[in-house]
Amino acid sequence: MHPGRRHLVATLALSPLVCMAAPHPGARPRTPAGFTATTTAEEATAGLDLRGRTVLVTGCNSGIGLETLRVLALRGAHVIGTARSPDKGRAACAGVRGRATPVVLDLADFASVRACASQVRAIAPRLDALVCNAGIVLDDWERVGGLEKQFVVNHLGHHLLVEELLAPVIAARGRVVVLGSGDHRNAPPGGIQFGRLSGEGWHARGYAHSKLANGLFSLELARRLRGSGATSNCVTPGHTRTAILRHVGNGYREDARTPAQGAATPCYAAVHPAMAGVSGAYLRDFEPAEQSPLQQDPAMAARLWQVSRGLVAAR
Ligand SMILES: NC(=O)c1ccc[n+]([C@@H]2O[C@H](COP(=O)([O-])OP(=O)(O)OC[C@H]3O[C@@H](n4cnc5c(N)ncnc54)[C@H](OP(=O)(O)O)[C@@H]3O)[C@@H](O)[C@H]2O)c1
């Protein structure tokens, strides 16, 4: 395993905290009593009736995304689940109780992102929640169209998807939930590498760089959504045993969470009444969590939005 990856595996979960998140004034969620790090997604959504709501979950065939799909459908939502192939999406949606519709999405291919968004707009003119969950961790330096691949898949593909689906989200006064990570703190010094997005010189920190991009994207989206009734929050599931480390070896720690636990805060942010109106927050275990100053930098967030918009438009 690449030495940078060993470091990553050790820090996929939150390491020591740096400084508090700064959600919008008055935006702090009132976490229901009894919700803790071991609370599962079923427990976090117990008693909720989501009939009539439509939720999109990317990466619905594995890990946290599969559990999010299962639990939100169980609670009555119509869940549109994306997967990279029709077979994976169909199998995931067929395996859950409730209403689930598969749609193909490859975040590394912007034509696929646009096609997915177009299908989703046709299925759901109103989207109550959009959970940007899909993600990869790579050991090797891989590029897509000259750009570091984790930045493309984890961030740019989701940026394009969300921009393409803003109308249905705003129509429902919906919630965008972006899966971030405590590992954002291991991003390269200076944060987003605007001058060399190929990964040259920093690809060993590519996952952390992409997760910082997720956090900054969510922050800037929250700013742009102000006054619309729609919200944007970033959540970290905590160190969770899924398939995400398959390219870097089995590096899960003894204390890794189950997907049922990892999906709890994403589901909470997407549908729980306690999160109504909350925007611009970074959450772990249902609470605003500590994050690096870089992830709270509004100028970097605004610049990332502009640069990302240019990159997706050009492809
Ligand atoms: N597990 C953790 O400890 C942890 C900690 C912090 C944050 N997170 C975040 O949680 C999210 C979910 O991860 P997970 O742990 O549940 O991982 P996972 O089990 O590996 O699931 C990842 C999902 O993303 C999909 N995906 C991968 N590449 C894609 C692409 N190019 N286009 C579209 N979808 C793609 C995968 O599809 P395939 O099955 O076809 O590859 C899969 O459905 C990620 O954003 C991750 O960064 C996880």
Image (cartoon, helix red, strand yellow):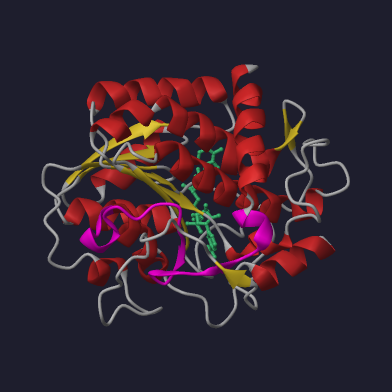
> In the image, what residue occupies the spot 71% across and 65% down?
8
| Left or right, 217 with reference to 310 | left
- Among the 4 quarters of the image, the one containing residue 249: bottom right
Residue 107 seen in this snapshot:
no
Dividing the picture into quadrants, the one containing residue 265 is: bottom left
Displayed quadrant of residue 285: bottom left
Quarter of the image with the N terminus in it? bottom right
Q: Which part of the image, by quadrant, shows the C terminus?
A: top right
Question: What residue sits 72% from the left and 62% below the top?
Answer: 186
Percent position of residue 104, x then y: 41, 30
The answer to whether any part of residue 185 appears in the image is: yes
- Please give left or right for residue 19 compared with residue 236 in the image: right
Against 123, residue 257 (above or below) is below
> Residue 168, image x and y in percent?
29, 29
- Residue 5: x and y in percent read 75, 62
**In this orientation, which residue lies closer to the viewer: 81 or 201?**
201
Q: Which residues are magenta?
A: 271-296
Seen as rendered, the residue at the extreme top is 314
- Of 280 and 285, nearer the camera is 280
Q: Point out residue 39 in the picture as x, y percentages from the top left corner.
A: 33, 76
- The structure residue drawn at horizontal position 53% and vertical position 42%, both measured from the top left corner, is 220
The answer to whether residue 276 is above or below residue 155 is below
Residue 113 lies, with reference to residue 30, above or below; the image says above
- Position of 77 with respect to 117 (left or right) is left
* Between 106 and 282, the one nearer to me in the picture: 282
Tally the numbered discs.
0
Instruction: Assess whether residue 231 is covered by the magenta stretch.
Output: no
Going by the picture, which residue comes out furthest to the right? 201
Look at 79% across and 44% down and name the residue there: 141
